[in-house]
Image (spheres, rainbow, N blue to C red):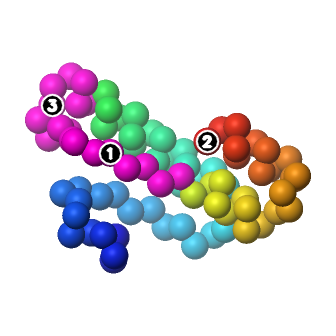
Amino acid sequence: MDMFGNYFDKEVHYPSHNIRDLDTIDNAVSRDVFEIMCKESKGDPEFKYDLLVAHLLGIDHAGHTFYSNHTEIQRKVLET
């Protein structure tokens, strides 16, 4: 958000410093994106958007933590 924050009307931040945590942030992002999409589809003007960006970090964290054939990499690829 430091680089691109002035381009977005709204944003949600999650603490992402624990690269061993592959799921907490992804679960929160998925939950929040689903909620936003449901509210937008019901015509809620607060949740009208032209572009919705969701940054899932688990796959990136897995890549920095495990080797390429590790089961956690495979799990995050399929999940993402």
Q: Mark 3 points at which residue?
A: 44
Dot 3, how many residues are within 10 Å of its Cα: few (below 14), some (14-19), or many (20+)? few
Q: In which quarter of the image is residue 75?
A: top right
For the point 84% across and 57% down, which residue is it?
68
Identify which amino acid the numbered label 3 is placed on.
Asp
Identify which amino acid the numbered label 1 is placed on.
Leu
Residue 80: assigned label: 2
For the point 66% across and 38% down, which residue is it?
79
Q: Where is residue 35 in the image (x, y as percent from the top left)?
A: 35, 35
Regarding mark 3 in the picture, which secondary structure is present there? loop
Q: Quadrant of residue 47?
A: top left
Q: Where is residue 64 in the image (x, y as percent from the top left)?
A: 73, 68
Query: Foreground: 78 or 13?
Result: 78
Q: Mark 1 points at which residue?
A: 52
Q: Position of residue 62 (x, y in %)?
A: 72, 59
Q: Position of residue 54 (x, y in %)?
A: 43, 49
Identify which amino acid the numbered label 2 is placed on.
Thr
For the point 80% across and 50% down, which residue is it?
72
Regarding mark 2 in the picture, which secondary structure is present there? loop
Q: Gap between marks 1 and 3, in whole Å? A: 15 Å
Which stretch is magenta? Answer: 39-56
Between discs 3 and 2, the one toward the N terminus: 3
